[in-house]
């Protein structure tokens, strides 16, 4: 994350143009009759956006656990960039392969579920002390993680 921030406007421009490159490659593949590969490329754009969201969430959790101020340290444009990648990836996929796209919505929900699970686990394990695990027991920890993931997935399911 720090390397992206150090890149400045060059990194931001590359992130901004990335969905256009994915869209162009996917469109050219679809135009040549390679629908399956075109769909895979378009879905890869969405997956990269989801990985960016996961990286952002984990970076923010790490920064807050180190005592840094999230609002003062990271410009807002860098916090919006991963969300832009997800939305632009979904837009590119819909533009190249128009239709109801129930399968992509299911894949998007699955990807968001993975982001939620990994972010909750990272947050919990970065904050948790070993004595908490000893006093609460592993079953209580699993129930707590399951409840957090279930609530967040329910919210995502309503949104997507």
Image (cartoon, helix red, strand yellow):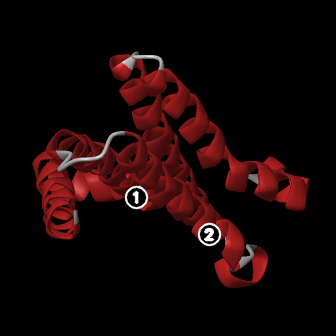
Report whether residue 100 is seen.
Answer: yes
Image coordinates of residue 129 in percent, x first then y, are 42, 57
In front of the other: 109 or 95: 95
Q: Position of residue 157 (x, y in %)?
A: 15, 62
Neighbor class of circle 1 (other Cα within 10 Å; few <14, some 14-19, many 20+) is few
Question: For mark 1, what is the residue?
Answer: 128
Whether pointer 2 and pointer 1 mark residues with C-beta atoms closer than 8 Å, the reply is no
> Mark 2 vs mark 1: which is more N-terminal?
2
Q: For the residue labelled by badge 2, is the local secondary structure a helix, a strand or a loop?
A: helix
Image position of 159 (left or right of 67): left
Which residue is drawn at the image coordinates 40% and 16% (left, top)?
34
Q: Quadrant of the C terminus?
A: bottom left
The alpha-carbon separation of the residues under discs 2 and 1 comes to: 25 Å
What residue is shown at x 45% (from left), y 61% (from top)?
127
Residue sitting at x 62%, y 63% = 81
> Percent position (x, y) of residue 68?
71, 74
Question: Relative to 159, is 88 on the left or the right?
Answer: right
Q: Is residue 146 left or right of residue 111?
A: left
Q: What residue is pinned by disc 2?
A: 79
**Residue at 22% over, 69% down:** 159
**Eyeballing the image, is 14 above or below 26?**
below
């Amino acid at each position: 994350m720090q390397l992206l921030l150090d890149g400045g406007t060059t990194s931001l421009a590359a992130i901004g143009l990335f969905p256009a490159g994915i869209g162009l490659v996917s469109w050219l593949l679809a135009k040549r009759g390679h629908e399956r590969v075109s769909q895979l490329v378009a879905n890869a754009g969405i997956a990269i956006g989801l990985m960016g969201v996961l990286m952002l969430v984990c970076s923010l959790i790490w920064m807050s656990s180190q005592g840094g101020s999230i609002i003062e340290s990271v410009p807002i444009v860098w916090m919006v960039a991963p969300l832009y990648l997800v939305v632009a990836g979904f837009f590119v996929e819909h533009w190249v392969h128009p239709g109801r796209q129930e399968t992509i919505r299911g894949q998007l929900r699955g990807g968001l579920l993975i982001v939620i699970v990994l972010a909750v686990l990272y947050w919990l394990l970065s904050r948790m002390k070993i004595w908490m695990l000893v006093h609460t027991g592993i079953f209580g920890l699993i129930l707590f993680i399951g409840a957090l993931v279930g609530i967040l997935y329910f919210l995502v399911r309503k949104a997507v």
